[in-house]
Image (spheres, rainbow, N blue to C red):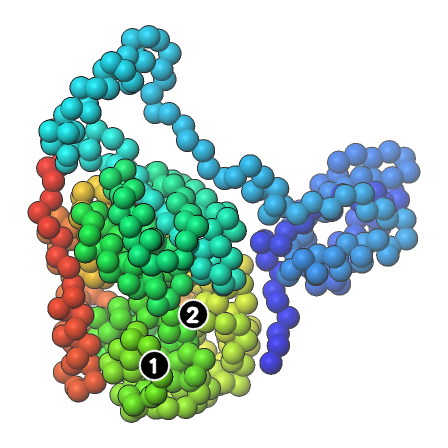
Amino acid sequence: MTARRLPSAGFSITIRVAVTADASAIGRLTTAVGEAGAVVTALDVVDSDQTAIIADLTCDTADAAHADQVVGALEALDGVEVRKVSDRTFLLHLGGKIEVTPKVALRTRDELSRAYTPGVARVCLAIAENPDDARRLTIKRNTVAVVTDGTAVLGLGNLGPAAALPVMEGKAALFKRFAGVDAWPVVLDTQDTDEIVNIVKAIAPAYGGINLEDIAAPRCFEIEARLREMLDIPVFHDDQHGTAICVLAALTNALRVVGKKLADVRVVVSGAGAAGTAIMKLLLRQGVGDLIATDRPGALYRGMPGLNESWQWLADNTNRENFSGDLRGAVRGADVFIGVSAPNLLTGDDIATMAPDSIVFALANPDPEVDPRAAREHAAIVATGRSDQPNQINNVLAFPGVFRGMLDAQARAFTDEMALAAARAIADTVGADKLNASVIVPSVFDARVAPAVAAAVRAVAKGEETVRPGEGLGAEDGFPTDGYHANAAADILRTTVDAPPLLPDPSAQ
């Protein structure tokens, strides 16, 4: 089962061409690009004379091979000379995407004496006497470490730390752009769990929070759990919790559109790795009606042999009817499909077997689990992780605001209640007057999102608001009490970490 990849800004190219100056010149260029399956996004005339036009043609392609095909289509035109081809993505990354900028001018000896020696010694002694002052007097107050070992880079697999660095740079840039948080990539040349835990513990004094990123499951679960036990700052694995928050927010609004309640629906999740597991645990925390976890072996069910610890937990706490078939069988009659796995696993015909007013979140990137165009023929609502499709579910809706709120509250831990509050804030940012099948989440550029999420997380961290299962997110109050959910509810409640006493508000100092 294959589907042609969709053009994307991630494979945008600019082609400089010289074309014979006549009335049809520009039209011939754009027609050739369109017939090659690319999308023209800009055309700029750079120079011209009486015989020729020099133009820069910018277009989105599907992949590198497709870009070559587009260039070949232009070269085949009479009177066209391709002079240069630039990959706009690589150009953007030249020299990296972030830098350090001082907050103080250091223009005079006087300023230097206070920012560095001898004046800085007084600040060092103050922190030595009261270590909590580091949260007020150093970058710790607003700085996050973005930590990876490069074992699960995007959907590309184990590429190692150097190849993971561009992603971590991008994450740091997003922190700054959307929430004013200073974040820095920490890429580790080790895949040993103990070593990673020890390194992060050792560098933690400089940071107000740890964002784990692109660490493969199931090791990521152990790394996060151990660091949470050791550190007095929040540890947040974005591939797990950021994804789960955004999916719950989107599902909340999707259910509002189709008029269903979370407690009444059956959800099928494809992918029981870091993201899928976190999504399912948060849905269980919120009181989902029924849930089936699937991965390469098919649906996870009680009594299934050869399960690791994480999959065993899912098998024991999901799948009410103990279904043991494949993904296609699982989605038959389901209300919701959530994919965080691999491309082209389903077809439009599979979506047609789902319940009426079905919801499809096909989040594999860049190619979803099902072609969104085919899915829309049968599903009431379709969302993807792509920026060129409606309803993009993107973690940038969550993590900047979540960390902004935790840093502002000087929180010591990230909790499930913060996740629920963040999901509710994201969902509610889309007003009732704007909500429809093509708008279930706000734009990533909606300036209201990060402040709303930060305020919600900050309120929970400071004990000003408590979010309980089922509140304000379209589910029935409390957990279901039927057998297969009882263990999940009790287990999650037992492991929820309450934030310890907070430091004084720095603004009151």
Quarter of the image with the N terminus is bottom right
Quadrant the C terminus occupies: top left
Residue at screen point 36% across, 17% down = 105
Q: Nearer the viewer, residue 99 or 356?
A: 99
Q: Please state which of residues 408 and 204 is positioned toward the viewer in this rendering.
A: 204
Q: Which amino acid, mark 1?
A: Leu
Q: Which residue is identified by label 2?
A: 340
Residue 175: image x %, image y %? 37, 44
| Left or right of 427 on screen, residue 379 | right
Left or right of residue 428: residue 447: right
Amino acid at pointer 2: Val
Seen from this angle, which residue lies furthest left? Answer: 501
Q: In front of the other: label 2 or label 1? A: 1
* Residue position marked by numbered label 1 in the rendering: 307
* Mark earlier in primary sequence (2, 1): 1
Say if 23 sits above or below 141 in the image. Answer: below
The front one of 283 and 253 is 283
Residue 159 rendering spot, x and y as whole percentages: 51, 57
Give coordinates of residue 474: x percent, y percent. Answer: 24, 71
Image position, residue 151 (x, y; %): 44, 59
What residue is rendered at 13% in x and 53% in y? 499
